[in-house]
Every structure is written in structure tokens, then in C-alpha cells.
Amino acid sequence: MITDLIAGLFMIAGTFLMFLAGLGLLRMPDLLMRMHATTKAGAMGIGLVMIGVALHFLEAGVTARVLIIVLFVMLTAPVAAHTIGRAGYFVGVPLWEGMLKDELKGRYDAETHTLASPPEHQNKEP
């Protein structure tokens, strides 16, 4: 009885986080911010829903599958978001006008598709 209540709370919290991920996808102004919103909230939401599933069933087989699913999502979502964000930047998807800093500007060579290292004076601490 109490296990079902806790499982339900995990599922509701996960659903709320996935709703926030969808809302962030619609409301954020550029690709990089959309990727951030969907990756963070979506991965955490899926994790919480899966924990709720494991608590609801309380079986070793289901729990093992849940752990594998959560591990897979936590490992692949940030890598996929980074790759898509990097591809969007290099293709020329416009950034938000309010962006304060673009550390890659001027360092990417579109002809050779290489990224130059920052100048040495930027790497040294004051």
C-alpha cells in the first residue's frame, strides 16, 4: 500500500519533469537552450518514472530492466544533445540575441571543419 503511494509520487514527479522538458522545448529561444531543457528535465523525468515502475512491480527482473534503462538514458541523452547542439552551431543555426558569450566564434573553420584551440593567453590563470 505505502509502496504504491511512493511509486505514484515518483511517477507524478517524473511526469511533471517531462512536462517541463516539453514546455522548455516550446518556450526557449534557441537550439542550445532547448537542448539543455529537454536533456536535463527529460532524462531526470524518465529516471523518476522508471523508479516508480520498479517500486510498483517489486520484481528483480523489472528492477534490472529499469536500472539498464535509466543508465542508458543518463549516458546517451547528454552525448546526443551535445552532438546535435554542436552540429546546429556549425551548420549556422542562429543563437539567441541575448547570448552574452560565444566561445566558439571565430575558432571554427567551415572549410576544413576543424576547431582551433584558444590562444595560449586565455588558458593561463591570472
Image: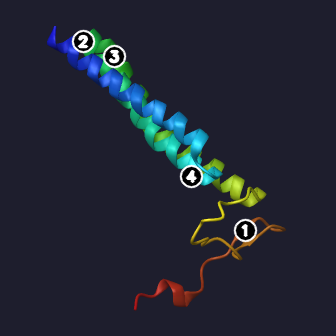
Q: Position of residue 6 (x, y in %)?
A: 22, 19
- 1 vs 2, front mark: 2
Please give the count of numbered marks on the rendered protein. Answer: 4
State the residue position of label 1.
114
Label 1: how many Cα within 10 Å (few below 14, some 14–19, many 20+): few
Say which residue appears at 28% left-offset and 9% top-offset.
57
Which callout, 4 or 2, points at the residue further toward the start of the chain?
Answer: 4
Q: Position of residue 93 (x, y in %)?
A: 74, 55
Query: Which mark is drawn over residue 126?
Result: none
Q: Amino acid at mark 3?
A: Val
- 4 vs 2, front mark: 4
Question: Horizontally, is 52 left or right of 126 in the view?
Answer: left
Which callout, 4 or 3, points at the residue further toward the start of the chain?
Answer: 4
Cα gap from disc 4 to disc 2, whole angstroms: 37 Å
State the residue position of label 4.
33
Q: Position of residue 61 (x, y in %)?
A: 32, 13
Query: To which quarter of the image does residue 12 belong?
Result: top left
- 3 vs 2, front mark: 3
Which callout, 1 or 2, points at the residue further toward the start of the chain?
Answer: 2
Residue nearest the viewer, comparing 44 with 108? 44
Q: Amino acid at mark 4?
A: Met
- 4 vs 1, front mark: 4
Say which residue appears at 65% left-offset and 56% top-offset.
86
State the residue position of label 3.
53
Query: Which mark is drawn over residue 58?
Result: 2
Query: To which quarter of the image does residue 9 belong?
Result: top left
Describe the element under mark 3 as helix, strand or loop.
helix
